[in-house]
Image: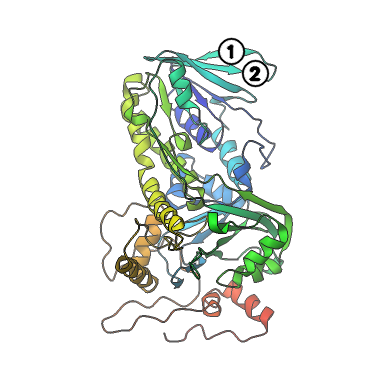
Amino acid sequence: MTRAVVLGGGFAGVLVAKVLSRHADEVTVVEGGRYPDGPGVRPELPQAYHSHVLVTAGAEALDTLLPGTLEALLARGAHRRGLPDGALILSADGWFRRHETGAFMVSCSRWLMDDVIRQRALADGAVTVRERTRVLGLAGDATRVTGVLVAHEDGSRETLGADLVVDATGRRSRAGRWLTAIGGPGVEEEVLDPGLAYSTRIYRAPPALAADLPAVMVHPRPERGRPGYGATLFPIEDGRWIFTLTGTRAARPPSDEPGFTDCARSLRSPLAAELLAAAEPLGGVRPFRATANRRRFFERLPLPEGFLVVGDALTAVNPVYSHGMSVALLGALRLDRELSERGARPRALPAIQAAMAAVAAESWRMATEQDRARAVAEGSGSGEGSGAGPAAGPGSGPGSAPLSAAGQRMRAKVSRAVLGSPVLMTRLFRAQTLVPVQTPFPAQEPVPARTPVPSGPALPAPSAGRPAAPPLDTDEAVAQFPELRDWWFSERGVQPPDPGREP
């Protein structure tokens, strides 16, 4: 009989437990808190008050792991927005034009996401959950983990025996400490903290825009030697919007209501501030500062048999890039495949641990390249960051290490080229949503659309000798979206531009 114990009953833990139930005879989840009835607040999850999305690869992994779950999320009020055909994105170099790339994001509250996935993953009763149970440490020694020592709510202690113990306790994991306590090796850790911070508030959307608002992303751009603010505005369930401001150590977004409103008005485009002025605030402003990238190299260790580390306990990237949940889904999918091929045997675990690390490698690379450049620039006071956008990542310019002045000019030229090229745009958004790019796209054949492109002016295909399309201003960008255009121009009492104008 194979017994598995999963430490942590959050997003990654529930997914891993579901996968293990297909390969082990008995699966138990140890969860320190208590699950709410429905999509409610969990005190041990403060980041749930902020923006959360699934990107393309994560959403597709979800439907592979738990068929029908993506449809269930949308039925409960989640929103699917194409990138950039369903999003207004102001990069450091200008507004993106609408174009179907096959990339998309799914936005809703973290509470709804957790509730729907948890209910569907645990519905068959194959996983036992022990709530309000605290992990004290591992049982076993440096050669073999045989279980986990836990404390119950009444203070009593118990050792849960297991053939496999999986740490899914997230970025605050104590796995390194647990291992050394039983004589195991210390774990090498890499931390990169760019000092990014954000503040979030939830709003009741005006009825006319509750269902069809495109996602809005404003990427920061340095102004007068100071880093700028970024922002995202995403529709979520129950006719609400979630709005997040981002900044760095030199320009942290305010957490008081007047400062938060003034900061929104100071953004490079008035769009977000105007939308919020028409909406009703629900609750106060919530700040968040724990955005460091953290990588623990468990795959390099001679781990005791019977122990595996997954999710944010292994690799946690800056939440601003919105990869965490999608990487957890991809990791669970990879775990299922590895267990199917190798079996749930202790001897297979070193290879499986390496596979778990590999799943997060591309997300780690993208996040740390952006944040390393940002951190160096912040230290120099130049304000020349990477241009990475808040909360969702897609739409940012390519990340890189700090460049010379000539290199910066070249990078800006490339970023501007992306705004007018269907092929480059497709590559960018698919890469940012973790879709592997296996071969170069044909110059005149963008990736086929998964869904019809909503109505709006098409991005002109490149042709020899044709000048690049001029950059859009805010009015022209908004005019691409009929569902927003009428409200935007009627509120301001002006005539919308001709959406079919020749660039």
Q: Quadrant of the C terminus?
A: bottom left
- For label 2, count other residues whose C-alpha is less than 10 Å away and answer few (under 14), some (14-19) or many (20+): some
The mark nearer the N terminus, 2 or 1, is 2
Q: Residue at x 63, y 42 (%)?
A: 46
| Residue 127, above or below 36 | above
Could you tell me the amino acid type at mark 2?
Answer: His
Q: Position of residue 197 (x, y in %)?
A: 56, 52
Residue at x 60% of width, y 73% of height:
270
Mark 1 crowd level (few <14, some 14–19, many ≥20, 10 Å Cα): some
Q: Residue at x 33, y 33 (%)?
A: 354
The residue tagged 1 is: 158
Residue 141 lies left or right of residue 497; in this view the side is: left
Counting from the top left corner in percent of width and height, residue 141 is at 41, 13
Q: Is residue 83 visible?
A: yes
Q: For this rendering, which residue is in front, 183 or 365? A: 183
The answer to whether marks 2 and 1 mark residues whose Cβ atoms lie closer than 8 Å is yes
- Foreground of the two, 81 or 261: 261
Outermost residue, front direction? Answer: 380
As displayed, is residue 167 above or below residue 283? above
List x then y, in percent, for residue 95.
47, 72
- Say above or below: 236 vs 355: below
Q: Under tag 2, what secondary structure?
A: loop
Q: Amino acid at mark 1?
A: Glu
Residue at the disc numbered 2: 152
Query: Could you tell whether 88 is left or right of 205 in the image?
Result: left
Considering only vertical position in the picture, is 206 above or below 375?
A: below
Is residue 448 at least partly visible in the picture?
A: no
Taking depth in this image into account, of 72 and 167 the one nearest to the observer is 167
Tell me which colouring the rendered structure shows. rainbow
Q: Secondary structure at mark 1?
A: strand
- In space, the residues marked 2 and 1 are separated at their CA atoms by 8 Å
Residue 35: mark: none
